[in-house]
Every structure is written in C-alpha cells, then in structure tokens.
C-alpha cells in the first residue's frame, strides 16, 4: 500500500488557513484529499457536492474526505485515513494549536509520511503573532498571505521558502502530486462555473536532474543539509556506488528507501529556485572516485 503524505497547515488565528485549504480543495483536479479539521464549519462544504456523511466524516463527490476531530483523536483518525484511498492528507491546525506537536504526531503515525509544515502568516497582522520566530523556524514553507492588503511585503526571518499570495492561492502542485480532473459524472456546483484557470496562482519552480554516474554520499547529504535557497521538497531516485535509494525530502525532513538499481532521477520543487546553480551543485555531487562503504553511513542514517 502506498504511503500517504500528510501536510500540516498551521498559522495564527485569522491568517488564512481555511481560505488556503478551500483553495486546495477547489484546484486539485482529481487528487483525493483527506482533510482533517476541528469542525466542519470552516470548510466550504456547500461549494462541493456532499455525497455521504458518516459521523464525523464527510465524503465529497470529488473524492475528498473531510473529518472533524479534536486533538486527542487525531492519531486514530490518521491511522484510519491511511487505509483509505487518498492521495494526500491535509491537517488544518486550529489557530492556537502547537505545530510541533502535530508534526510529531504525523511522524509517529503508521502508513503516512511527513508532507511538510506549511505556515500561513498574515502580511498585515504578523507583528501580533506570539512565538512567530519559533513557528517560522519549524516551517518547511511559509505562505505570506493577504499580500493584497499591503503595499510592500514584510521580510520574515526564516530559512524556509516564503511565498507571497492573496487568498491562499498557491499552486497545489507545490505541496503534492496533482492528478488530472476525474471527468466522471458529478453534480455541477456554482463553484464549477467559475473559471479557475484565469486565477493567478503563486506558481512553483521545479528542477530535474538525472545522472548515470553514482553520487557521492557525503557531498549529496551536504547539499540536502545546506537546504538550497527556495527548495521545499525533493523526490526521486539517487544512485550511489553502494545502492540506489528513493528519496523524499520536505524542508529539513529526509527519508531514503532502498530500491532496485537505477540511475539518479530527481525532481526538486520550490519557489524562486536558481535552476542553473542547483544543477551545477548537483553535478558537483557526482562521485569522481570510488567511495568506501563507510561513507554510505551519511545516507543510511536516513534509511527507512
Ligand atoms: N484581503 C484578504 N483577506 C483574506 C485573505 N485570505 C483570507 N482572508 C480573509 O481573512 C479572514 C480569515 O481567513 P480564514 O481563512 O478564515 O483564516 P484562518 O486562519 O482559517 O482563521 P482561524 O480558523 O480563525 O484561525 C476571512 O475573512 C478571509 O476571507 C487575503 O489574502 N486577503
């Protein structure tokens, strides 16, 4: 069974988390999203056709599932959702929830992988957020929302990529794989009548890299540890002299899984990536000389 990525969406009260979530639900084509919220009141369920409701779970006709749970039930709900036919799970933390506790819970839940902490900041009210620096330090991607309300964007002190948007309109492909829309029969909603293709989405950049030559484990891990500016996630295969691994990174989170031998094939995703310098950096990580098996320990400590 596939491992389902879980994206944690956090941010202070009123920063625009629900607006962003509704945007993701509307613009993710045929991607089946499991949404975990505190209560349904926040999700614009009326904009989607509801096909079924069972207790705390609502099934939407676009294949998305919505569950309302409080913090104590979250671990259990994640376990249940991990067995469903979903492509991604998004947890909306309530404005006062501690993001680090949620991330820990995701890292411990079986059948899911960590898909990143997206932290929404209100471009006007950011000064009023308690512990902003602490939360920004944990974020894998910062969404600087309500850009329409300021004439110049504040600069935030964070190593994570920052994406300035209005009304949470980020490109969902930055966060997860977006499937083409499922064109099966479904009820039309008012929302469908809006042409979303003309909306401006804050887009993402991607850089692909392939190499038949093995990578040097230490040099490659140094690159990941340095977190090239703007890089949010990386996925694909990495060939080393002593084995090929499937790589999945989000922010500082790194996971390697051993696979059959294959050339290195990577996709790096982020905002404002400098494609040329990233490619040069990756080329510089190709092993020019034989590598000892001890040097593979740099990679094996992240193997699952
Ligand atoms: N002008 C403007 N308003 C926005 C933007 N994004 C969200 N809003 C409005 O800001 C208010 C709060 O947005 P929500 O999405 O409910 O924020 P939230 O973070 O989910 O709020 P809580 O659940 O209370 O923590 C709503 O009235 C939104 O319509 C934006 O980019 N620009």
Image (cartoon, rainbow, N blue to C red):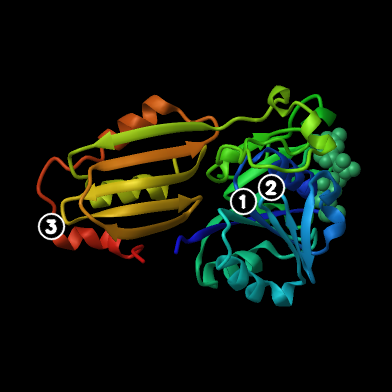
Give the alpha-carbon distance from disc 2 to disc 3, as whole Å.
Answer: 51 Å
Residue at the extreme left of the image, as rendered: 290
Out of 251 and 262, give the one closest to the viewer: 262
Out of 251 and 67, give the one closest to the viewer: 67
- Asked whether the residues under the numbered discs 2 and 1 touch, taking CB atoms below 8 Å apart as contact, a structural biologist would say yes
**Within the displayed image, which quadrant is ligand 1 positioned in?**
top right
Depth check, mark 2 against mark 3: the one in front is: 2
Q: Which residue is mark 3?
A: 292
Give the alpha-carbon distance from disc 2 to disc 1, as whole Å.
Answer: 7 Å
- Would you say the beta carbon of the disc 1 residue lies within 8 angstroms of ligand 1? no
- Asked whether the residues under the numbered discs 1 and 3 touch, taking CB atoms below 8 Å apart as contact, a structural biologist would say no
Q: Residue at x 36, y 44 (%)?
A: 223
Residue at the extreme front of the image, as rendered: 185
Can residue 128 be seen in this snapshot?
no
Q: Which residue is mark 1?
A: 32
Q: Residue at x 46, y 32 (%)?
A: 206
Can residue 102 be seen in this snapshot?
yes
- Would you say the beta carbon of the disc 3 residue lies within 8 angstroms of ligand 1? no
Answer above or below: position of 142 versus 246: above
């Amino acid at each position: 069974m596939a491992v389902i990525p879980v994206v944690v969406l956090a941010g202070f009260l009123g920063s625009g988390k629900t607006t962003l979530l509704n945007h993701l639900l509307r613009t993710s084509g045929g991607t089946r999203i499991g949404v975990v919220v505190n209560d349904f009141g926040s999700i614009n369920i009326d904009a989607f056709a509801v096909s079924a409701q069972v207790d705390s779970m609502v099934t939407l006709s676009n294949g998305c599932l919505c569950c309302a749970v409080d913090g104590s039930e979250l671990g259990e709900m994640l376990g249940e959702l991990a067995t469903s036919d979903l492509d991604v799970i998004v947890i909306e933390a309530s404005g006062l929830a501690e993001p680090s506790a949620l991330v820990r819970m995701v890292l411990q839940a079986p059948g899911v992988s960590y898909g990143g902490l997206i932290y929404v900041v209100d471009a006007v009210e950011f000064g009023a957020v308690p512990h902003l620096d602490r939360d920004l330090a944990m974020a894998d991607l910062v969404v600087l929302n309500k850009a329409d309300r300021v004439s110049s964007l504040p600069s935030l002190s964070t190593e994570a990529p920052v994406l300035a948007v209005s009304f949470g309109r980020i490109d969902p492909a930055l966060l997860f794989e977006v499937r083409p829309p499922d064109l099966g029969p479904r009820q039309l909603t008012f929302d469908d009548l809006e042409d979303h293709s003309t909306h401006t989405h804050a887009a993402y950049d991607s850089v692909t890299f392939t190499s038949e030559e093995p990578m040097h484990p230490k040099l490659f891990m140094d690159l990941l540890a340095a977190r090239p500016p703007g890089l949010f996630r990386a996925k694909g295969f990495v060939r080393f002299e002593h084995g090929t691994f499937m790589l999945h990174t989000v922010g500082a989170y790194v996971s390697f899984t051993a696979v059959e031998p294959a050339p290195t094939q990577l996709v790096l995703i982020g905002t404002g990536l400098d494609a040329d310098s990233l490619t040069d950096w990756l080329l510089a990580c190709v092993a020019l000389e034989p590598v000892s098996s001890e040097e593979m320990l740099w990679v094996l400590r992240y193997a699952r």
